[in-house]
Amino acid sequence: MASTSKTSALLQLIRFDKPIGTLLLLWPTLWALWIAARGVPDCGLLAIFIGGTFLTRSAGCIINDLADRRVDGAVKRTSGRPLVTGAVTEKEAITLFFVLMLAAFGLVLLTNPLTIWLSVAAVVLASTYPFMKRYTHLPQLVLGLAFSWGIPMAFAAQRGELPAALWLVFLGNFWWIVAYDTKYAMVDRDDDIAAGVKSTAILFGRHDRVIIGALQLLCLLTLYLAGRAFELGLYFNLSLVVSAALFGYHQYLIRERERDACFRAFLHNNWVGMAIFAGIVLHYSASAATQ
């Protein structure tokens, strides 16, 4: 029974029951793999990146909880986390973190030297983000870099090079991440202020919805330019239209800045990632059908 309880606590630590973080990290990586391959990517690489996404996100959750273990108890949403309740010890969490990172690095070693070197930056970004909220109101920018780093890694693995246009995909994804993580931070804003934790939601204050809207527009514009650079067609542009409609719905949800509604808006971004991926897949499928 104790073993089952410990396993459950460790799964809770890596958010196994809350896959949204893995999905939000995975969608842009899949965008990049499909674009880099000009269609269906190498099956081995696809498996590596799906597995690596799960492992690195899980490890990221652990380092985040280790960094926040002194303040999570004061935040309503996080007060039941395993490190707060004592269901998982710090030693157990650190051990699991290194096991997951070693497994992720083992997958990266199956790619090429350029991808391996890029993975070093990925580790630095993922490990740095949780501590940024102590020193700056812009930790969401660091998360944006960390959650976008799978894009150049996917191009490096699939093509062995980094075409300049990939940075448009990177930047579009970056704006999207800062927007949706600001919604996430709006959920905890009152608790974070009391606990001394910083975020863009606190920094933006009453201008939060306007700035989120500007970030959403920047995301759509930059991804549109990326689509032109990679010669993506009608289906991709339609996916951006769908994404714009979803962004409008998110603005509706957060209109009163109510805690649960802001959290629903954050979770709903999964559909944005899926819509854009569908547009990319449909573009290459239609192109293959006409050849």
Image (tube, rainbow, N blue to C red):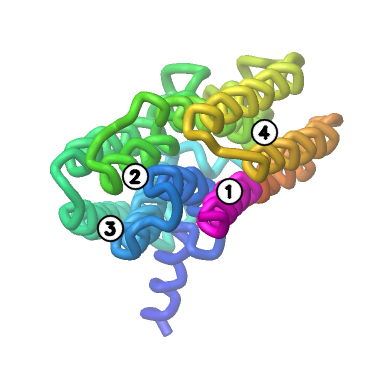
Q: Nearer the viewer, mark 1 or mark 2?
A: 1
Please give the label number shown on residue 90.
none
Residue 277 painted magenta: yes
Front-most of residues 288 and 282: 288
Residue 230 vertical placement versus 28 (above, below): above
Where disc 4 sits, the SS reads helix
Q: Earlier in the sequence, mark 1 or mark 2?
A: 2
Q: Which residue is mark 4?
A: 183
Residue contact between numbered discs 1 and 2, judged by CB atoms under 8 Å: no
Q: Which residue is mark 3?
A: 100
Q: Is residue 85 left or right of residue 78?
A: left
Residue contact between numbered discs 4 and 3, judged by CB atoms under 8 Å: no
Q: Amino acid at mark 4?
A: Lys
Magenta residue span: 275-291
Q: Earlier in the sequence, mark 1 or mark 3?
A: 3
Q: Amino acid at mark 2?
A: Ala
Q: Is residue 178 left or right of residue 57?
A: right
Q: Residues within 10 Å of mark 3 (few under 14, many from 20)?
A: many
